[in-house]
Image (spheres, helix red, strand yellow):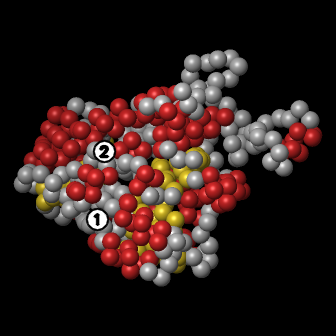
Amino acid sequence: MLPEEFAEATRLVRGGLARSPFDETAEAIYPTSGFVYRSAEEAAAAFAGEVDRYIYGRYGNPTVAMFEERLRLLEGAEVCRATASGMSAVFAALACFLGAGDRLVASRALFGSCSVIVTDILPRFGVESVLVDGRDLDQWAAALAGGASAVFLETPSNPSLEVIDLAAVSDLAHAAGALVVVDNVFATPVLQHPMRLGADVVVYSATKHIDGQGRTLGGAVLCSQAFHDDHLQDFLRHTGPSLSPFNAWVLLKGLETLRLRVDAQSAAAERLARHLVEHPAVRSVRYPFLESHPDHDVARRQMEAGGTIVCLELNGDQAHTFEVINALEIFDISNNLGDTKSLVTHPATTTHRRVAADLRAEMGITASLVRLSIGLEDPDDLIADLTAALAR
């Protein structure tokens, strides 16, 4: 069978496996910065692109290539390129082809660092950035009416869990001549498949669910062969956001259990969300698969499950919200997510602190909003921990 014909579970364990002559069971780690040549002629041919081989650690590495191929097979993309972090993946995916005079239309509901790239860094290079309410197709249509080079969005969004209709936005973007770049980190590559819905480029922070155990940083850009050859390859080679071989090996191991972890975490997250819907100390519960979620129908249509993240808006101010967070005993206070350990953070003062106050308000990031990343603990223990903290 060809690797593309493997079932998902098999691809997650065996995709991209390339054993050395020693026939090791686990994937090998190649901690080398460079590679040697048998002759000066071979080196010249390698740099001329006449032979296909590893040249330099910044260009490629066998362990990194195994991770890239495994994730490529999982996503169903033509190419996957790994990066040192999720944010380097986001920046590379946009900066490799956007330039002065280009127009970028993006959803306003973005992770804090993504918002900085879109609203601050790219405009310094002459890129016009336009923000829209990602759930409003009329706003997308109006913003794209004048044309655009790219569309950028994340769905579900961090942290407000807005869900965007990927197929509809992709159709609008392509009609305007724009490429669609999707940050799929909250949905994970097993719960949502943006390329099947029209996306051209998909980015991940592999630091999150792909590692899933708080061990390492990593990122990935998935795209067509043409996008890679025309834009991405040279950008990565010459700016150097390289993933280390050891981190690639850790992420390979993470992919092996990705489906098992995400399924269990998503089931626990939905159970916790439904339990807290009627809690008197909670103003609202945000979770894509709750019937009360405004984007519930879209989420059900394009996601296999609601994901591992739950957001609570509490009845009270920031001081009260901090008291609840500090009273939690099982949840660790951390701005990471997708971990096997359950985590809690206060987005307004951490992940989205640098986002302008008016934009935070538009995104629904209030002083009483709490983001929960559900891990693999017993759901009953997590519910008891939250219930006790809210009662205090």
The residue at which mark 1 appears reads as 365
Query: Residue at point 51% right, 58% down?
Result: 200
Q: Are marks 1 and 2 in contact (CB under 8 Å)?
A: no
The three-letter amino acid code for the residue at tag 1 is Ile
Using the image, determine if residue 93 lies above or below residue 385: below
Q: Quadrant of residue 95?
A: bottom right
Using the image, determine if residue 255 lies above or below residue 173: above
Which of the image's four quarters has the N terminus?
Answer: top right
The residue at which mark 2 appears reads as 304
Secondary structure of the residue carrying numbered label 1? loop
State the mark number for residue 41.
none
Question: Which residue, as the protein is rendered here, is positioned at the far right?
Answer: 40
**Residue 322 x/y as whole percent:** 23, 55
* Relative horizontal placement of residue 90, taking residue 20 as reference (left or right): left
Question: Which residue, as the protein is rendered here, is positioned at the far bottom?
Answer: 146
**Residue 389 x/y as whole percent:** 16, 46
Closer to viewer: mark 1 or mark 2: 2
Query: Residue at point 47% right, 49% down?
Result: 205
Crowding at label 2, few (<14), some or many (≥20) Cα neighbours within 10 Å?
some
The three-letter amino acid code for the residue at tag 2 is Glu
Inter-mark Cα distance, 1 to 2: 26 Å
* Relative horizontal placement of residue 218, taking residue 162 as reference (left or right): right
**Residue 21 x/y as whole percent:** 71, 19
Using the image, determine if residue 141 lies above or below residue 228: below
Q: Earlier in the sequence, mark 1 or mark 2?
A: 2
Secondary structure of the residue carrying numbered label 2? loop
